[in-house]
Image: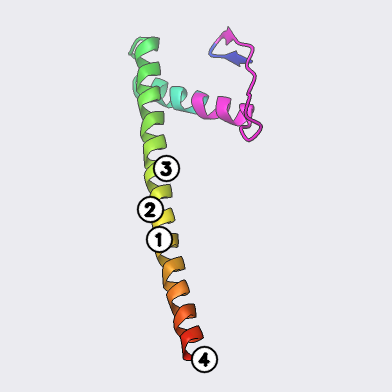
């Protein structure tokens, strides 16, 4: 794999991860910093890109937790309704 002029041998141990999708995501984040902060040293752009990726991860993690809590609440409500119908019979 070629990444910003450097060649890397990259293998994924996880079958659920598409390596090319991962490479494209990281490349886009670094390129975004290059556009926004063109005058910065490359290592600083990389740090900003990593921080942005961390932000994306934390936001996704938070949204996932909120969705899980919402589904648990809805499932509990459905179970309560089913139980109340069963008790009536």
Q: Are marks 1 and 4 in contact (CB under 8 Å)?
A: no
Q: Is residue 59 visible?
A: yes
Q: CA distance from mark 1 to mark 4?
A: 29 Å
Magenta span: 5-26
Q: Which residue is mark 3?
A: 60
Q: Nearer the viewer, mark 3 or mark 4?
A: 4
Q: CA distance from mark 3 to mark 4?
A: 44 Å
Q: Secondary structure at mark 2?
A: helix
Q: Nearer the viewer, mark 3 or mark 1?
A: 1
Q: Is residue 57 magenta?
A: no
Q: Which residue is mark 4?
A: 89
The residue nearer to you, when weighing 68 against 59, is: 68
Q: CA distance from mark 4 to mark 2?
A: 35 Å
Q: Are marks 2 and 1 in contact (CB under 8 Å)?
A: yes
Q: Position of residue 32 (x, y in %)?
A: 42, 27
Q: Which residue is mark 1?
A: 70
Task: Please tell me how crowded label 1 is: few (under 14), some (14-19), or many (20+) other residues with Cα within 10 Å.
Answer: few
Q: Which residue is mark 2?
A: 66
Q: Are marks 3 and 4 in contact (CB under 8 Å)?
A: no
Q: Secondary structure at mark 1?
A: helix
Indicate which disc, 3 or 4, sits on the residue closer to the N terminus.
Answer: 3
Q: Quadrant of the N terminus?
A: top right
The residue nearer to you, when weighing 33 against 61, is: 61
Residue for point 66% across, 32% down: 15
Compared with 59, 11 (above or below) is above
């Amino acid at each position: 794999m070629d990444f910003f002029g450097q060649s890397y041998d990259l293998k994924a141990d996880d079958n659920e991860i598409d390596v090319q999708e991962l490479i494209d995501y990281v490349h886009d984040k670094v390129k975004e910093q290059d556009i926004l902060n063109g005058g910065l040293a490359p290592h600083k752009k990389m740090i900003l890109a990593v921080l942005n990726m961390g932000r994306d991860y934390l936001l996704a993690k938070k949204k996932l937790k909120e969705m899980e809590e919402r589904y648990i609440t809805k499932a509990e409500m459905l179970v309560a309704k089913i139980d109340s119908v069963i008790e009536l019979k």
